[in-house]
């Protein structure tokens, strides 16, 4: 019997991260889900995945803290012996205009989104390099490409992830480790569900496909980038945005 592959998804207990974990589980991967808040029903997610016939390890960790990250990765290796795919999804927003943005609001977003991606990637790639294989997918955003008023901190973190991804791809290609990023546009999640109908309509009017994307549509691209079907793709940023940025 072929050995099952293992995926680690940061921020994997809700939204796009949970959808990513679900797609990998449906395709027979054992799943490591990182979460930071006890408010999420992570045990329910674990049960749901194990009913699909795959193993699921839950690890609580703050991705902006090196000790937490290293403990998380060591727990995953102790459980499964390897990590084949890493999805750096954990992220936060603290939106406000630049003139009103506190230093804390700027620092926290950079710490979780950008530094967190660096810390987890660094910790996981030690093990990927020994196996001489692996795929890393980082969550960027279209605002990291084109910017957005009120999101200087978030846009900077996501633009940083794009540059980081390209550099990692160049460094690790000789070890058969690929690194790519996805840049979602407006995706229907809990964060967008609170918007009024008029705001949603004005957003949809800016999108050539005239609708928001779904978390599943993002997750399917991330699954493709983690699979052997994308074995000759590295260092790329794929916009999943209904044509907003082209």
Image (cartoon, grey):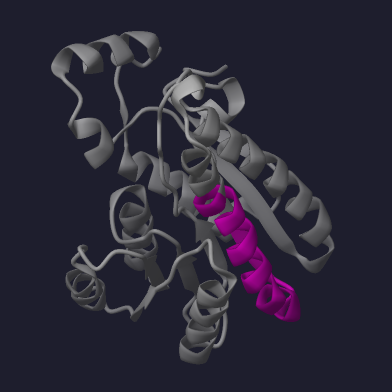
Residue positioned 51% across, 58% down in the render: 87
Q: Quadrant of the C terminus?
A: top right
Q: In x, y percent, where is residue 219? A: 40, 48
Q: In x, y percent, where is residue 185? A: 43, 28
Q: In x, y percent, where is residue 118? A: 64, 58
Q: Is residue 189 above or below residue 224?
A: above
Residue positioned 75% across, 52% down in the render: 169
Residue positioned 20% across, 75% down in the render: 43
Task: Choose top left, top right, bottom left or bottom right for residue 96.
Answer: top left
Q: Nearer the viewer, residue 195 or 130?
A: 195
Q: Which of 93 and 21 is in front in this view?
A: 93
Residue 48 seen from this side: yes
Q: Is residue 138 above or below residue 54?
A: above
Residue 233 seen from this side: no
Residue positioned 65% across, 40% down in the render: 160
Relative horizontal placement of residue 169, taking residue 117 as reference (left or right) = right
Q: Residue furthest bottom?
A: 78
Residue 169 drawn in magenta: no
Q: How many marks?
A: 0
Q: In this view, does 175 lie above or below 223?
A: below
Q: Give the range drawn in magenta.
A: 111-136
């Amino acid at each position: 019997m072929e050995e099952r592959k293992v995926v680690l998804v940061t921020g994997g207990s809700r939204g796009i991260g949970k959808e990513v974990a679900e797609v990998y589980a449906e395709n027979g991967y054992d799943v490591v889900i990182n979460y930071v808040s006890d408010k999420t029903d992570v045990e329910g997610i674990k049960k749901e995945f194990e009913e699909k016939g795959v193993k699921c390890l839950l690890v609580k960790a703050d991705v902006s803290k090196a000790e937490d990250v290293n403990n998380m990765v060591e727990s995953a290796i102790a459980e499964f012996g390897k990590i084949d795919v890493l999805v750096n999804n954990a992220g936060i927003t603290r939106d406000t205009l630049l003139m009103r943005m506190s230093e804390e609001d700027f620092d926290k977003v950079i710490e979780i989104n950008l530094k967190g991606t660096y810390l987890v990637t660094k910790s996981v790639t030690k093990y990927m390099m020994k196996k001489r294989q692996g795929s890393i997918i980082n969550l960027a955003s279209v605002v990291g490409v084109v910017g957005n008023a009120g999101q200087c901190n978030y846009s900077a973190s996501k633009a940083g992830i794009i540059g980081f991804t390209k550099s990692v791809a160049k460094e690790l290609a000789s070890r058969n480790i690929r690194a790519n990023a996805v840049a979602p546009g407006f995706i229907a999640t809990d964060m967008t569900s609170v918007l009024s109908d008029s705001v949603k309509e004005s957003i949809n009017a800016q999108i050539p496909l005239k609708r928001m994307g779904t978390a599943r549509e993002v997750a399917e691209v991330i699954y493709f980038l983690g699979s052997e079907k994308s074995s000759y793709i590295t260092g790329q940023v794929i916009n999943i945005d209904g044509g907003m940025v082209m």
